Amino acid sequence: MAIEIPQELAAEAAHVIADKSGIDHHHLALTLGSGWGGAADLIGEVVAEIDAADIPGFSAPSVVGHGGKITSIKLKSGHYALILGARTHYYEGKGVRAVAHGVRTAAATGARICILTNGCGSTVPEWGPGTTVLLSDHLNLTATSPIEGANFVDLTDLYSSKLRGIAHSIDPELPEGVYTQFPGPHYETPAEVKMARTLGGDLVGMSTALEAIAAREAGMEVMGISLVTNHAAGFAPGNLNHAEVLEAGREAGPRISRLLADIVAKISETELS
């Protein structure tokens, strides 16, 4: 039996989304990480909510605090956004294809812009819980890539400087930083965090980088934005736990959701046609 290539599965998933939502073309995709879920209610009118498990290649989320829906939303500009509420993390053991499937599906629905959000740890003392940081670059420490074969994708401007400029037009005070993806699911040791900091990593987490690479391979323009939920190990005053991460996300949720909704509105007005 022939092995289905990732892009074929993404096209199949996009067809199902179009059929279930009634929307043939989405213009923008958002993956909403810890703390960011409230933005879906602010950016426009929900057209359809689909259980992720009903779409080829997707499965129900295995992490507390993450949704399990793929949502089609009509923006105020008249464009359509696809909300990927069923992120698969590399540490779930489903393989890097599953991690990249969401953004590949979004690209197959027509989306040209991909916004990736996450909750993360900080190695910058001044960036405590609740700080929002635009991603300017990343370090991929998962020892893998979503790209298969001799396909040499340029990542020089992976996190679009143009989209970062739009975000700064909404909030000029937004800092920019380098995100480091570790494989997880354990939190990083103090020595690993120190290594990331020495290499130039301002933020540490367990998502985003692999998705960003896949999105660029698919031809999408990428924006990454992080919510600091805690200082990383060795920079934190005590031990780390997931409950504190969720609580930080809940506290910052209304503020960061409004920020993201405003950024999406500006992007849809200026960059989508």
Image (cartoon, grey):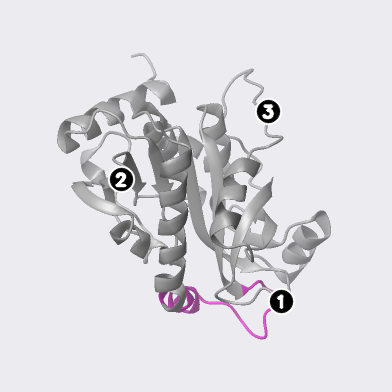
Q: Separation of disc 2 and disc 3 at Cα?
A: 30 Å
Where, by quadrant of the figure, is residue 106 drawn?
Answer: top left
Please name the amino acid that badge 1 sits on.
Answer: Glu
Does 216 lie within the magenta span? Answer: no
> Is residue 125 visible from the viewing direction of this image?
yes
Magenta part of the protein: which range?
231-250
Give percent across and percent down for residue 190: 73, 71
Determine the residue positioned at 64% across, 66% down: 173
Residue at image mark 1: 126
Please name the amino acid that badge 2 sits on.
Answer: Ser
Determine the residue positioned at 73% across, 57% down: 201
Give percent across and percent down for residue 141: 68, 48
Q: Are marks 1 and 2 in contact (CB under 8 Å)?
A: no
Please name the amino acid that badge 3 sits on.
Answer: Asp
Which comes before the other along the chain, label 2 or label 3? 2
Residue at image mark 2: 59
> Is residue 184 visible from the viewing direction of this image?
no
Where, by quadrant of the figure, is residue 196 drawn?
Answer: bottom right
Does 232 lie within the magenta span? Answer: yes
Q: Are marks 1 and 3 in contact (CB under 8 Å)?
A: no
Give percent across and percent down for residue 271: 48, 37
Q: Separation of disc 1 and disc 2 at Cα?
A: 38 Å
